[in-house]
Amino acid sequence: SQELEQSPQSLIVQEGKNLTINCTSSKTLYGLYWYKQKYGEGLIFLMMLQKGGEEKSHEKITAKLDEKKQQSSLHITASQPSHAGIYLCGVTAAGAGGTSYGKLTFGQGTILTVHP
Amino acid sequence: GAVVSQHPSWVICKSGTSVKIECRSLDFQATTMFWYRQFPKQSLMLMATSNEGSKATYEQGVEKDKFLINHASLTLSTLTVTSAHPEDSSFYICSAPLASLKLFGPGTRLTVL
């Protein structure tokens, strides 16, 4: 099975600082998803990456997938307290079809705290 | 817009009782839904795949007789935790695929006393 390693496990930053969260896979990533979760709540979809070298941005968050498709990074610029939460990367099974479609395996998550 | 809803959002029950959690896809159909469990300060762990019209597929280590899954229609899957015990207390989240998106419900917090 594919394993995802997220780093760091937790991160505390001062408001306004930039930060990066990494997600590394033991196998090639065919569909990499980034989600944000507030404690006790559901997952908020951030971005999905599929192609090697792909980069997507939304507001102050940028996600990249490396050319080899084994590592992704999530970068937040000028962090705000509203960015605080748990960030999860998830991956779909390679070539999955049928009932496996849509199943995600998640990294262990990164807990982000932003101090005002 | 298309969303996934869950009911209830939280439930407290006594040990030994059964609890049913509903997962609904709104404004789209889902032949497959996924049930995850999340313990405090941990990531999501897939429990089972719910299939409309057929039996659910359980992940290794998940007891199928304890976590009953019924995919009653193209918009509803239910997870029943039977004979709940305190160690079943957790946050349960369902997910449904919509094209390339994986939509998640808001979760259900189960506390077993």
Image (cartoon, coloured by chain):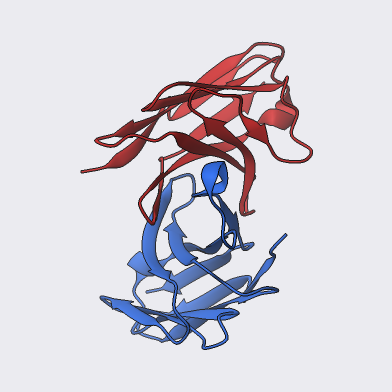
* Chain with blue colouring: A
- The quarter of the rendered structure image containing the N terminus of chain B is top left
Q: Quadrant of residue B49?
A: top right
Above or below residue B64? Residue A21 is below
- The quarter of the rendered structure image containing the C terminus of chain B is top right
> Which residue is found at the position 55% from the left and 62% from the top?
A91
Q: Quadrant of residue A41?
A: top left
Of all residues, the one furthest to the right in this rendering is: B61
> Which residue is found at the position 35% from the left and 84% from the top?
A77
Of all residues, the one furthest to the left in this rendering is: B1
Point out residue B99 in the picture as x, y percentages from the top left corner: 35, 52
* Number of marks drawn: 0
The residue closer to the viewer here, B111 or A75, is A75
> Which residue is found at the position 41% from the left and 40% from the top?
B105
Above or below residue A89? Residue B103 is above
Q: Quadrant of residue B24?
A: top left
Point out residue A90 in the picture as x, y percentages from the top left corner: 54, 61
> Which residue is found at the position 48% from the left and 44% from the top?
A40
The residue closer to the viewer here, B7 or B112, is B7
Q: Find chain B in the image and tell me its colour.
A: red
Point out residue A102 in the picture as x, y percentages from the top left corner: 49, 49
Above or below residue B2? Residue A75 is below
Above or below residue A104? Residue A116 is below
